[in-house]
Image: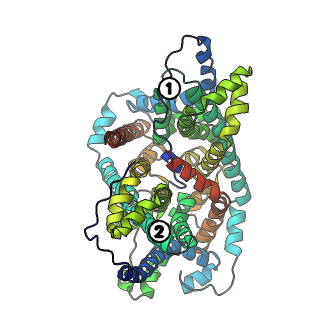
Amino acid sequence: MAVPDTVAAAPSAATPAPAPPSRRRPRGRDAAYWLYLLPGAALFLLVIGAPLVGTGYLSLTRWSGVGDPTFVGFDNYQRLLHDEVFWASFRNTVAMIVAMVVAPTLLGLLLASVLFDVIGRRFKPRTAAALRAAFYLPQVLPVVVAGIVWGWILRPDGAFNSLLDAVGLGALRHDWLGDPDTALPAVMAVMIWVQIGYPVVVFMAALQRVDPELYEAAEVDGANWLHRFRAITLPQIRPETFVVALTCTIAALKVFGPIFALTRGGPENATNVPSYFAYYTFFKKLQVGYGSAISTVLTLIIVVVAGVFIGMQARSERRDRGF
Amino acid sequence: MAVTLTPAPTPVRRPVRDRHHRGVSRWLVLALVTVGALVMLVPFAFMLLNAFKSPGDYSSGGPLSWPTEFYTRGLRTYWSEVNFPLKLWNSALIAGSVAVLGVVVSLLNAYALGVGRVRGRLWIVGLFLLANMLPQEALIYPLYYVAKEIGLYNTRLSVIIIFTVIQSAFGTYLLASVLGTFPRSLLEAAALDGAGKWTVLWRVVFPNLRPTLAVLLIFFFIWTWNEFLIPLVMLIDNQTQTIPVALASLQGDRLMDAPTTNAGALISLVPAILFFLIFQRTLARGITAGAEK
């Protein structure tokens, strides 16, 4: 995810309850609004609805992309269950969630709160803004460009190995992306570098919303930084934490560009992910039915994860109101 | 949201000692965060350093040495070899069209959903939100196949249409919530003056929504600019490719020695950094607008 879905922090379910039915309203009035939905709905059905159904159907067929698909029922899904590459790709997704959600969110919380609470208040605001920009910069560039630069840095003759030589750790020289043992950790490190700026910026914006008197009162009472972090910062920015966790989890499940640019899933599938696996199956192996089954499973997982997150968020908001 | 402060364990105030203590540790914190920020910038520094080296210089001095001469042929080779101005135009045309069309479609949808409150709108909004989260692999093969059948394959138009829909799915979700709280009095006043729905949309809703629409426009532009999978599949030609696809498809090519790789990456990220600098304020506003519920 390059420049992030920051606006996603927008009002969730802010649409107010339906207006009570009014008898005086002429019937045709609301119906006319459907006209405005028409172009969007038609495009939506054409570009999202129909292809989605198409992929679902193709997942039940064997097809190379030419001629007619052969209907095979759930054969592709059976094959998935026994496909070691498929399981490997999902294990790697867990690693991607660690690198793109868990680590950036935790580090981002810490950094945003240090930048806001310590540096923003004890130094000039411009210092905090400049530091924030440095952390955000990787989010600005196309993720493929980041992948290509990092791919070169981690190459056997790349900058990272030279750096190790320069500081006397030349013994650690390594083909970081070429060795199955180090490829996944290396990709994870790159993804943390790419992702960290997003939570930092969102959390800093969230902290601006918090009444500064809360912090001042806590400080006068002698609460140390950790107390203030736990008692004020964390509860106050919980809505943003949900949004960051949701958008980053979806991005981690879908990650494609960085894998394509860094390793193309290799070596020996050590960095393969469902998204790349599906792409490869579609366009390199020309197994459209099997690729569709992979995509369908990935879609279902994303829908379930999004549903669980949104449900959790709604429950936590209800709990807040309950107090 | 009310916050109850956990009472501090030591209510004794020690202002003098505490300030002194803080005085030292704040510099320590600053130093730590600055080191972190510098580590973030190191890859950019490597890229700059090596974009201006000759291949010979690189192979003798390695990635960390200072360039012995200010070598720009790598940059120029990349520029002409990939026909960079054309790629820049392709990216700008696609991202610009998607930004404008996506905002228009989002606004029309959201007008029906947020102001018109058509029946079942919560489900419709949910559907749009879900569509934005879908993996693009779930759409790509049918889109690729149909585009080939109807002659839209390898055209910029195909990518423009697809991303207009994907981005407006998000825009609809966002704007529908914003318009759900649009002041009814303004709408009713306009209706009393005899304005029809079309007039209300463009004369009342649109001007009031302009700042939000500007933020959406910029986000759509940047998101589309950075997209990779669908352009990679749809745009196979030198004439139609976008910047990220052109850079990635050169990778592994013999042309791409280390200095050229860095030169290419450097040129490719300049537009992105320019947007960031130009629109920083709007982006910040978008983030803050998003944070206010």
Judge the density around disc 1: few (<14), some (14-19), many (≥20) Cα neighbours within 10 Å.
some
- According to the image, label 2 marks what residue? A115
Location of residue B252 in the rendering, given as x and y in whole percent from the top left corner = 54, 64
Q: Which of marks 1 and 2 is in front?
A: 2
Circle 2: element type: helix
Examine the rendered structure and indicate whether residue B28 appears above or below residue A6.
Answer: below
On screen, residue A133 versus residue A172, left or right, reads right
Q: How is the image coloured?
A: rainbow
Quadrant location of the C terminus of chain A in the rendered image:
top left
Q: Which mark is residue B6?
A: none
Circle 1: element type: helix
Q: In which quarter of the image is residue B162?
A: top right
Location of residue A273 in the rendering, given as x and y in whole percent from the top left corner = 39, 52
Please give the name of the residue rendered at 67% of the width and 33% of the height, measured from the top-left corner.
B205
Q: Which of B84 and B37 is in front in this view?
A: B37
Examine the rendered structure and indicate whether residue A34 appears above or below residue A101.
Answer: above
Chain letter of mark 1 equals B
Q: In which quarter of the image is residue A82?
A: top left
Q: Nearer the viewer, residue B125 or A241?
A: A241
Q: Nearer the viewer, residue A25 or A242?
A: A25
Residues under labels 1 and 2: Cα distance?
41 Å
Judge the density around disc 2: few (<14), some (14-19), many (≥20) Cα neighbours within 10 Å.
many
Q: What residue type is labelled 1?
A: Arg
Q: How many marks?
A: 2
- According to the image, label 1 marks what residue? B121
| Residue at mark 1 shares a chain with residue at mark 2 | no
Q: What residue type is labelled 2?
A: Leu
Chain letter of mark 2 equals A
Q: In which quarter of the image is residue A81?
A: top left
Location of residue B123 in the rendering, given as x and y in whole percent from the top left corner = 46, 27
Residue B196 visible, this orientation = no
